Amino acid sequence: MSLESDTLPLTAAMRIDARSMSSPDRCNTLPVLPKREDLTLAPNTTPTSITPTLAFAGSAAATALWFAALVAVPELQRSDLSIIVARIAVHLIVLGGTWAALSRTSFITSERTWAWLAIAVPLTLWHGAAWFIVAHGLLLPGAVSIPLLPLMIVVPTAIVITLLSRSDRIGVLLDVMPVNWLIGLQAYRVIGGVFLANWLAGTTPGVFALPAGTGDVITGLMALPTAAVLASGRPGSTRAALFWNLFGIADLVVAVTMGALTTPGPLQQLALDHPNLTTGTYPTAIIPAFTVPTSLVLHALSLRQLLRRTRGAATIAV
């Protein structure tokens, strides 16, 4: 088997002992995790007739309409309704996607439910804690004596990525999940365009808004086209997916760095005459406080998924 195809699909052959199925302790028995040599070839993307061009056109049109509405109707931007609705929608989509991925495994219903809860409950608590902190103004300049926002981004992200990268069950879940799901999901990144709208309104300095907002919009616009390319199995599609992930991570790093350098506080070095005040206000601050860490985790999972499949394909081909 040739290794030139970038998207050699893999599905974990989840083996469950028949004797354990009849055991009264079945619900407490974990399914046997597959070994790499037990993996079999199977489709690893969601079949779709949507072309990358059509995916990009749809994303661009929707983003343009949303951005035009923000600019044309200032009340919509000031109400912050779009950010609140988008954040809730993204949270529900992540939870729904997790359940859909678990449905592709051979876990029984109770195992699937507990696995979903093990992800959904911490994620929801994390989101709720971030929302509480933002809503109570704790990220406003001078509200606390420590750089709370950078800590909220770095610490949870490092902990979650470390735990997920060491989890065998997450690895199995990534093996059975279509490889384009985690990428297409991040189409929500276009909501970062709100920083560009704030810049046009004169409320956010361009030194922060231009790189952060533009990078987010590009990442979001290219999410569905990249997912479509990956689903098509075209040569180079895996490299395109890897590049998209790296670009998305770089965008987040730049946004966080520029946010810290332009926001009043011990780290501010730029925009001294027009400081960045919006990133600490409700509900805009939910984007750096929760959306950024969530996006970094999704990028890490996508990279792990792509690399697992690449290594698995090489092992099977040998």
Image: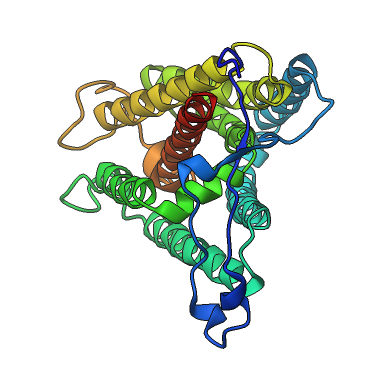
Q: Where is residue 223 in the image (x, y as percent from the top left)?
A: 62, 26
Model colouring = rainbow
Residue 204 appears in the picture as rendered: yes
Q: Where is residue 186 in the image (x, y as percent from the top left)?
A: 58, 35
Q: Does 232 sit left or right of 193 as displayed?
A: right
What residue sits 58% from the left and 65% below the top? 16
Q: Does 273 sit left or right of 212 as displayed?
A: left
What residue sits 45% from the left and 29% below the top? 311
Q: Can you name the residue that lies furthest to the bottom here?
A: 24
Q: How many labels does the image show?
A: 0
State which quadrant residue 233 falls in: top right
Residue closer to the observer: 192 or 100: 100
Q: Does 189 sit left or right of 296 as displayed?
A: right
Q: Answer above or below: position of 166 versus 276.
A: below
Residue closer to the observer: 275 or 316: 316
State which quadrant residue 178 falls in: top right
Q: Answer above or below: position of 35 versus 248.
A: below
Residue closer to the observer: 221 or 193: 221
Residue closer to the observer: 59 or 136: 59
Question: Which quadrant, please, contains the N terminus?
Answer: top right
Q: Answer above or below: position of 54 versus 105.
A: above
Residue 201 appears in the picture as rendered: no
State which quadrant residue 74 falls in: top right
Q: Position of residue 22 (x, y in %)?
A: 63, 82
Q: Position of residue 270 (x, y in %)?
A: 25, 21
